């Protein structure tokens, strides 16, 4: 698997005239070699020359964490006090252009340019994003398993099986975080629990506000689940529930949101540009007069990272191909009053859009 992925990266390097790919912290590294570097101040770097064998340069003390794959990469360790950048530079073989991991610490980029002033740097995503964003069947199945896991949690919320009234957002968020692990993820990425007017802030951090009757609560949760060869894939879902009967205004807003979501998913067919999916969802909200309250793109790609390419956004004319996995998540946010979002992960297939999240889209009303 890793060899095939690296072969694709090399082909892209030839196309783009890039001599070496340098991957450090971030999701490219596990995707291409199965090892995820801790975000440490010590340098870890996979050096992938266009025409040579990859080397993983890493701190000696991290070596026990590496699953060695001699058929994929050679391992070279360095000890505290040694010049790690020099180990990388030794392996550049006079490279003129290097594609450097987008999330590499800027400090290492500076050190690299100090050591090689003529080296031209580009972002690794130029090479890696087009490869990573097209999921094969095995990757889609891990995404589907992760989606099913968060579905089970929010289905319980919709059914009123997780008590809400009187508890703080943070308390409910902590319970959901435990469930994310119990349902089969290895990592919790986020647990947004936003009550009442807090839901008007799309990335609200669950806090000390207590949930109360007569208000809506927005849940946006996700984690990372391990798939083949230990590489993890992400879940991401949003649902809103209302504690007690909703006001007419909120019900109306939610109906618009649901129609927007349906339009976005229906538009997500192979060959449709990403921006047309955004436009399809956005038009419904604009036509209903809520356009100014839909303040973000309609969606983002998902895979090894919770947010990756392709973005479902105006200006992205990339046509969907089978295997693109992304969220469709329109939102309407009225500052100080209320907010709502509805989010599923969708995979473009030759048979049409395949929604990985399957639980009810309607506004669930729970007792309060
Ligand atoms: Zn989300
Ligand atoms: Zn999302
Ligand atoms: Zn629906």
Image: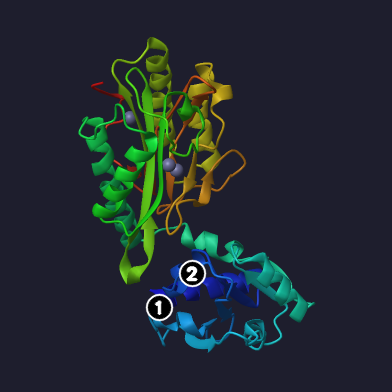
The x, y position of residue 80, in whole percent, is: 58, 84
Instruction: State which quadrant residue 314 falls in.
Output: top right
Q: Residues within 10 Å of mark 2 (few under 14, many from 20)?
A: few
Asked if one can make out residue 359 in the rendered structure from this viewpoint, the answer is: no
Marks 1 and 2 sit apart, C-alpha to C-alpha, by: 10 Å
Taking the spot 38% from the left edge, 58% from the top edge, the residue there is 233
Taking the spot 56% from the left edge, 87% from the top edge, the residue there is 78
Callout 2: helix, strand or loop?
Answer: loop
Quadrant of the snapshot with the C terminus: top left
Q: Residues within 10 Å of mark 1 (few under 14, many from 20)?
A: few
Quick check: which quadrant has ligand 2? top left
Q: Tell me, for residue 111, which label it has, or none.
A: none
> Residue furthest toward the top?
248
Taking the spot 54% from the left edge, 28% from the top edge, the residue there is 294
Asked if one can make out residue 109 in the rendered structure from this viewpoint, the answer is: yes
The x, y position of residue 154, in whole percent, is: 28, 38
**Location of mark 2 (residue):** 38
Instruction: State which quadrant residue 68 falls in.
Output: bottom left
Q: Nearer the viewer, residue 31 or 163?
A: 163
Residue 211 vs 41, above or below: the answer is: above
Q: Are marks 1 and 2 in contact (CB under 8 Å)?
A: yes
Left or right position of 128 against 251: right
**Location of mark 1 (residue):** 65
Callout 1: helix, strand or loop?
Answer: helix
The x, y position of residue 288, in whole percent, is: 50, 16
């Amino acid at each position: 698997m890793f060899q095939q992925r690296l072969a694709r990266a090399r082909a892209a390097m030839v196309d783009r005239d890039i001599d070496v790919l340098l991957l450090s912290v971030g999701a490219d590294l596990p995707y291409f070699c199965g090892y995820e570097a801790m975000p440490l101040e010590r340098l870890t770097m996979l050096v992938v020359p266009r025409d040579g064998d990859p080397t993983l340069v890493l701190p000696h003390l991290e070596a026990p964490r590496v699953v060695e794959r001699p058929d994929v990469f050679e391992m070279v360790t360095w000890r505290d006090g040694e010049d790690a950048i020099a180990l990388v530079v030794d392996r550049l073989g006079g490279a003129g252009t290097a594609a450097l991991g987008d999330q590499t610490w800027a400090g290492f980029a500076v050190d690299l340019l100090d050591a090689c002033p003529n080296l031209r740097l580009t972002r690794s995503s130029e090479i890696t994003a087009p490869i990573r964003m097209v999921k094969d069947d095995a990757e889609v199945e891990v995404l589907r398993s992760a989606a099913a896991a968060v579905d089970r949690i929010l289905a319980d919320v919709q059914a009123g099986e997780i008590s809400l009234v009187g508890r703080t957002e943070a308390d409910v968020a902590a319970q959901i975080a435990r469930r994310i692990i119990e349902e089969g993820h290895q990592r919790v990425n986020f647990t947004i629990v936003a009550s009442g007017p807090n839901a008007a802030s799309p990335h609200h951090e669950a806090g000390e506000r207590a949930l109360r009757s007569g208000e809506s609560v927005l849940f946006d949760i996700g984690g990372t689940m391990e798939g083949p060869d230990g590489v993890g894939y992400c879940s991401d879902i949003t649902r809103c529930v209302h504690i007690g009967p909703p006001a007419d205004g909120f019900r109306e807003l939610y109906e618009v949101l649901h129609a927007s979501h349906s339009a976005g998913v229906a538009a997500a067919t192979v060959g449709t540009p990403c921006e047309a999916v955004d436009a399809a969802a956005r038009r419904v909200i604009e036509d209903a007069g809520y356009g100014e309250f839909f303040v973000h793109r309609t969606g983002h790609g998902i895979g090894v990272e919770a947010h990756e390419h392709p973005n479902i956004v105006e200006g992205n004319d990339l046509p969907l191909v089978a295997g693109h996995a992304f969220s469709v998540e329109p939102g309407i946010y009225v500052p100080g009053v209320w907010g709502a979002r509805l989010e599923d992960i969708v995979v473009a297939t030759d048979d049409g859009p395949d929604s990985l999240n399957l639980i009810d889209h309607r506004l669930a009303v729970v007792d309060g």
